[in-house]
Image (cartoon, rainbow, N blue to C red):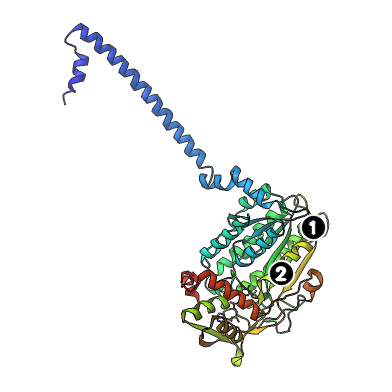
Amino acid sequence: MPPPLLLEGELFPSSPGMLHRRSRRHHLMNRQIRRCSASTFFLIALTASYLSFRSFFPSSSSYYLRFGYSWDRLVRSSASPRRDSGISVLVTGAAGFVGSHVSLALKKRGDGVVGLDNFNDYYDPSLKRARQALLSQHEVFVVDGDINEAQLLARLFDSAQFTHVMHLAAQAGVRYAIENPHSYVRSNLAGLVTLLEACKSSDPQPAVVWASSSSVYGLNEKVPFSESDATDRPASLYAATKKAGEEITHSYNHIYGLSITGLRFFTVYGPWGRPDMAYFSFTKNILQGKPITIYRGKDGVALARDFTFIDDIVRGCVASLDTAGKSTGSGGKKTGPAPYRIFNLGNTSPVTVPKLVRILERNLKAKAKVIAKEMPGNGDVPFTHANISSARTELGYEPKTDLESGLKRFVKWYMSYYGDSNKGDTNPEESRQ
Ligand SMILES: O=C(O)[C@H]1O[C@H](OP(=O)(O)OP(=O)(O)OC[C@H]2O[C@@H](n3ccc(=O)[nH]c3=O)[C@H](O)[C@@H]2O)[C@H](O)[C@@H](O)[C@H]1O
């Protein structure tokens, strides 16, 4: 193939003057090409080193969002108490039902609060985001993260000196364990251990208050349920993981001197509640004219729960934080015995599920379409009933809200949040009912 004309002219000039001019141009061009190659090489090298620098971190942008200067500042400011002798609390599951209420209560009285939540889609995450927005209005910073992320937890404990951890993040729900058993292992066992590891390594160690469950009483028939009763016959994997949590926290108390308070919550309900729970899904279905299923026990006996209103639970949580003795460990070693406590937080007056439905019907001014079914053998227990003497004595806990007034407040919130639209339809748990 003939060389291009221009090049031919450069190589074989028709006159010496032209040769001179062409040779200078050639020289200049060569210099430009060399400069160009050098800068291209420099750019490539720069890009390569930037990319290899980025690969040190799982995601550079999320790293800076999470651990940058402004992230640290947000964590520190949110964790700082605004009153003398205020406490500083890391609340896990802060965008959850109980977590959001406890976080607000603490912040309102001047304590420092940092939230942690993974915003999973067990139920409609938009409800969790709405709770987060509410917390944000009250200057509670909720970190988007999981209790299984050891690095994140270490960073949180580095950024702020938490005096307490209120551990409420968990895979909740008794019957969902049939569908997704591993999520219980991941959150309620692995996540719990990761969190306790972070607490034990922190200096100073925080006191830990965490959510166990009334479900640990399982097939216990002695009523009311007392903390000293046997809890070795769980009826669901959920209950088994909560019971295991009580044993796991005990070992951290024994070995590392962590101050531990486990709270056995009894079917907590109220405004901003969990859409997977019966009172919530019944409300939605009654308003939408859809049927609800009411389970019955042996011989058609109505099931009953010691339904406990959220405000009472919040008072019990805050009192537990206030009375939790200090952890005694330092540098991963215990220097003396630390408190290990377990309390029932219930209402002490069980109500049957059909009665719950009648109260809802009155408040909603609508009739439920009821399908009665035998209780499936998927983890449910026939009744729960709390003895709260210990919580009364040690925490000054006194439930003040009966189911009638508590449901009234729930329905009021439900109508203001969802209106009469069918927003509840977006809930993934719909398919689980
Ligand atoms: O105390 C706890 O530790 C637990 O409380 C809660 O579990 P439960 O007491 O089982 O509440 P919830 O599901 O509202 O069912 C209430 C009643 O309605 C009956 N029920 C339920 C659904 C239905 O469709 N029909 C029905 O009859 C059902 O048979 C039951 O009799 C929390 O979800 C759990 O996370 C944990 O915190």
- Mark 2 crowd level (few <14, some 14–19, many ≥20, 10 Å Cα): many
Where residue 231 appears, x then y in whole percent? 71, 76
Secondary structure beneath label 2: strand
Furthest residue toward bottom: 299
Q: State ligand 1's quadrant.
A: bottom right
Q: Residue 241 occupies which quadrant of the picture?
A: bottom right
| In front of the other: 13 or 312 | 312
- Compared with 81, 415 (above or below) is below
| In front of the other: 110 or 52 | 110
Q: Quarter of the image containing the N terminus?
A: top left
Q: Which residue is mark 1?
A: 326
Residue plotted at (16% across, 24% down): 2
- From the viewer's perspective, tell me whether residue 118 is left or right of residue 214: left
Where residue 193 appears, x then y in whole percent? 66, 60
**Residue type at numbered disc 1:** Lys
- Compared with 276, 363 (above or below) is below
Where residue 148 appears, x then y in whole percent? 60, 57
Residue plotted at (79% across, 70% down): 396
Q: Which residue is mark 2?
A: 263
Query: Which tag, 1 or 2, sits closer to the chain's start?
Result: 2
Residue plotted at (51% across, 84% down): 366
